[in-house]
Structures are given as structure tokens and as C-alpha cells.
């Protein structure tokens, strides 16, 4: 069973207060297999403005899905932050073999 962590655009775990905030329009769902075989991040922006999203470890992410269409024909690798346009979602996959420190021991290649 993968571990799930709900995140804000600043890579902070959502608190109970965050969940109750009526202005909450962006959130992320970090899914991590404790074996390090798979780490995925689904980020959603239901707001009317783009959001800069700080990516959690691992440091390199592949963009699998981007509903905004902004990356058509562009680099599909993300490092550090990504710009999530208004009313869009993005699905990213972490570098294979790495685990998030949120779910136990980092893998041998964790940076």
C-alpha cells in the first residue's frame, strides 16, 4: 500500500486548517511506494491564477500528464519548481529508485 501525503504548493503537508480554508484552490497528492520503486505527485490548481509549485524530493521529476497544454513540444523534466497554470493538473513521476523521506528511509540514491 503506498503512502499518501497531501501537500501545499510550498511542499508543506496540508494541516486541518488548510483543509477547512475556503480559499484552498491548489493541492498535491504525493504517492510513494515504501520500496522506492515508485513515487508520483499529482498537483491540482482549481484557481484562476497560475501557481509556482515547489517539488519535493526526489529532485528530478518526469511530467507524465499536463492538462494545460503549455508543455507541448517542450522539456518534460522538472527540477525544483514547476509552474502550474490556472485550472489544470499535472502528474509527475519521481526518479526511479528514490523514496521520499516522508515515507521512511531514503533509497541509496536519495539526494
Image: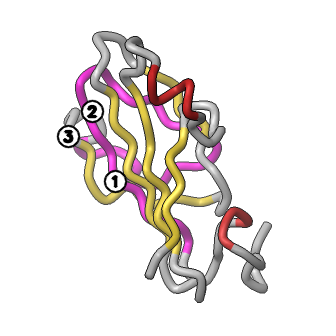
Which residue corresponds to the image point at 48% horizontal and 78% vertical from the top-left? 38
* Mark closest to the chain's N terminus, 3 or 1: 3
Depth order, front residue of 28/83: 28
- The span picked out in magenta is 72-95
Closer to us: mark 1 or mark 2? 1
Please tell me in which quadrant of the rendered image residue 49 appears: top left
Residue located beneath label 2 in the image: 70
Q: Residue at x 27, y 32 (%)?
A: 70
Q: Is residue 90 magenta?
A: yes
Residue at 63%, 51% in the rendered image: 56
Sequence-wise, the earlier of marks 1 and 2 is: 2
Residue 73 within the segment the image draws in magenta: yes
Q: Is residue 88 above or below residue 38?
A: above
Q: Nearer the viewer, residue 41 or 2?
A: 2
Kind of element beneath mark 2: loop
Q: Is residue 28 left or right of residue 10?
A: left
Above or below residue 110? Residue 67 is: above
Query: Is residue 93 left or right of 87 when viewed as pictured?
Result: right
Determine whether the residue tagged by mark 3 lies in a helix, strand or loop. Answer: loop
Identify the residue shown where x is 55% and y is 33%.
Answer: 16
Q: Quadrant of residue 40?
A: bottom left
Q: Nearer the viewer, residue 72 or 78?
A: 78
User: Which percent across, then down, holds residue 6?
Assistant: 50, 47
Q: Which residue is mark 3?
A: 67
For label 3, the crowd category at 10 Å Cα-Cα, with few meaning under 14, some 14 to 19 and many 20 or more, is: some
Question: Do the residues bearing badges 2 and 3 touch, measured as CB atoms within 8 Å?
Answer: no
The disc placed on residue 91 is 1
Depicted 18 relative to depicted 27: above or below: above
Q: Residues within 10 Å of mark 2 (few under 14, many from 20)?
A: few
- Work out how far the residue at label 3 is from the one at label 1, CA to CA, in angstroms: 9 Å
* Tag 3 and tag 1, C-beta contact below 8 Å: no
Amino acid at each position: 500500500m503506498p503512502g499518501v501525503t497531501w501537500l501545499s504548493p510550498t511542499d508543506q503537508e496540508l494541516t486541518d486548517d488548510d483543509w477547512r480554508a475556503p480559499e484552498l484552490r491548489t493541492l498535491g497528492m504525493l504517492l510513494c511506494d515504501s520500496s522506492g520503486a515508485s513515487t508520483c505527485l499529482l498537483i491540482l490548481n482549481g484557481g484562476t491564477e497560475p501557481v509556482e509549485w515547489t517539488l519535493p524530493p526526489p529532485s528530478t521529476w518526469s511530467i507524465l500528464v499536463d492538462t494545460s497544454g503549455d508543455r507541448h513540444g517542450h522539456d518534460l523534466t522538472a527540477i525544483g519548481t514547476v509552474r502550474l497554470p490556472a485550472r489544470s493538473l499535472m502528474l509527475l513521476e519521481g526518479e526511479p529508485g528514490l523514496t521520499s523521506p516522508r515515507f521512511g528511509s531514503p533509497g541509496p540514491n536519495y539526494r
